[in-house]
Image (tube, helix red, strand yellow):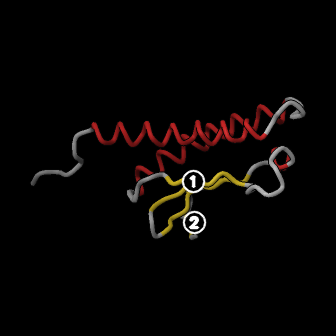
Amino acid sequence: MAGVAHTPYLEKRPSGYFFRRRLPSSWQEIVNPGQVSAICLSLRTDVLSDAKILVARLTTFTDAAFALTTERPVDHLKPEHVTLLSEMARFQISAHEALRACAKSRVAWA
């Protein structure tokens, strides 16, 4: 699991790029003890430029979610909320993948 230089939360693995971000300590209290303390999602790409775009979006998205919980008590949060965050991140990845599939090829003709 090697990190990609200068791009936080982006990991390069043999199967492609991944978004991996630890949950804040306040969220870790919500999650069951047996569960992982980080969000780790395949970006479903091996293209660095696409991975950087997705990681920037997911970083902004998770920053907003984490900031909201620092401003308010997290007593009302449940494990389902962590699952919802992961599912919304997966939606971002799927939407990016669908958009990329509809776009014209980036191959330049000589």
Q: Quadrant of residue 67?
A: top right
Q: Earlier in the sequence, mark 2 or mark 1?
A: 2
- Give the percent coordinates (x, y) of residue 51: 46, 52
Image disc number at residue 19: 1
- Give the percent coordinates (x, y) of residue 54: 49, 45
Which element carries disc 2, helix, strand or loop? strand
- Give the percent coordinates (x, y) of residue 19: 57, 53
Q: Amino acid at mark 2?
A: Gly
Lateral position of residue 99 relative to residue 107, left or right? right
Q: Amino acid at mark 1?
A: Phe
Q: Residue at x 48, y 52 (%)?
A: 43
Lateral position of residue 68 relative to residue 50, left or right? right
Label 2, on which residue?
3
Between residues 78 and 65, which one lies in front from this camera angle? 78
Badge 2 density bin: few <14, some 14–19, many ≥20, Cα 10 Å: some
Q: Residue at x 83, y 36 (%)?
A: 70
Q: Quadrant of the C terminus?
A: bottom left
Between residues 34 and 10, which one lies in front from this camera angle? 34
Lateral position of residue 63 relative to residue 55, left or right? right
Lateral position of residue 65 relative to residue 17, left or right? right
